[in-house]
Amino acid sequence: MKLLKPVCILGMPASGKSYFAEALALHWEVPCIHLDQVIERAEGRSIEQIWDRYQESAFRSLERYYLMHQLIQKPVVMSLGGGTAAHFDNMFLIQNLSFSIWLKVGLSVLEQRILEKPRPLFQNLDEIMPKLEALMNFRYQYYERASLVVELNNDEPKTLTNVTTYCQRQNIISE
């Protein structure tokens, strides 16, 4: 298939953005990138190191720069960080320069995934759910502006097929 426009995968931490982006790109036989990995390679530091050394505001500036850079390159499937859409005018850029997919996953599922595989944003917390609820309350207004909302279940092949059909109808991909 040919990708005619970048596809951005967004959602909460532990929603499966990277996994879904890779599965979709593999299904379509197109390139896949992860914005966090782009930043890490370009800056020569991990996201945690950048965050610790320069704080969130500097990280978000870098994130916006690399997002914009990637959106004007050859179209790819790109997984974004959980907060990417909620800072600066990033969601405006995502809406206008790409096709976006929000992976909508229940908070209890996210909590379980974070307990199984800890994330930096949730370190040193006695309870994960209050942080998840606060993040969702803030980010929902951005996520809901995605081109397509995908409520994930356990039927990955059907989900990929449905997303593919929808994207073909929207002229995001072609045979």
Image: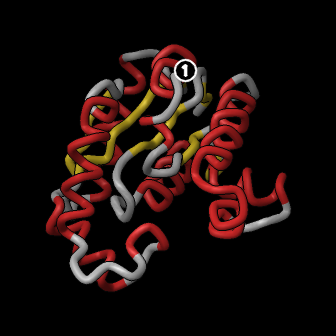
Residue 68 locus on image (x, y percent): 68, 28
Specify the quadrant that holds the C terminus: top right
Looking at the image, which residue is at 34% across and 53% down?
12
**Mark 1 nearby-residue class (10 Å; few <14, some 14–19, many ≥20):** some
The answer to whether residue 173 of the structure is visible from this angle is no
Query: The disc labelled 1 sits on which kind of residue?
Result: Leu
Question: Vertical placement of 108 versus 143: above or below?
Answer: below
In this image, 164 relative to 62: left or right?
Answer: left
Given residues 147 and 31, the one toward you in this image is 147
Looking at the image, which residue is at 46% across and 26% down?
91
In this image, 167 relative to 33: left or right?
Answer: left
Residue 129 locus on image (x, y percent): 18, 68
The answer to whether residue 126 of the structure is visible from this angle is yes
The residue wearing badge 1 is 93
Looking at the image, which residue is at 40% across and 26% down?
167
Q: How is the image coloured?
A: secondary structure
Residue 46 locus on image (x, y percent): 71, 67
Specify the quadrant that holds the N terminus: top right
Given residues 89 and 17, the one toward you in this image is 89
Question: Vertical placement of 28 versus 55: above or below?
Answer: above
In this image, 35 relative to 169: left or right?
Answer: right
Given residues 157 and 106, the one toward you in this image is 106
Looking at the image, which residue is at 43% across and 54% down?
17
Question: Vertical placement of 43 versus 7: above or below?
Answer: below
Which image quarter: residue 131?
bottom left
Given residues 21 and 71, the one toward you in this image is 71
Residue 92 locus on image (x, y percent): 48, 18
| Number of residue marks | 1
Question: Vertical placement of 12 versus 77: above or below?
Answer: below
Q: Secondary structure at mark 1?
A: helix
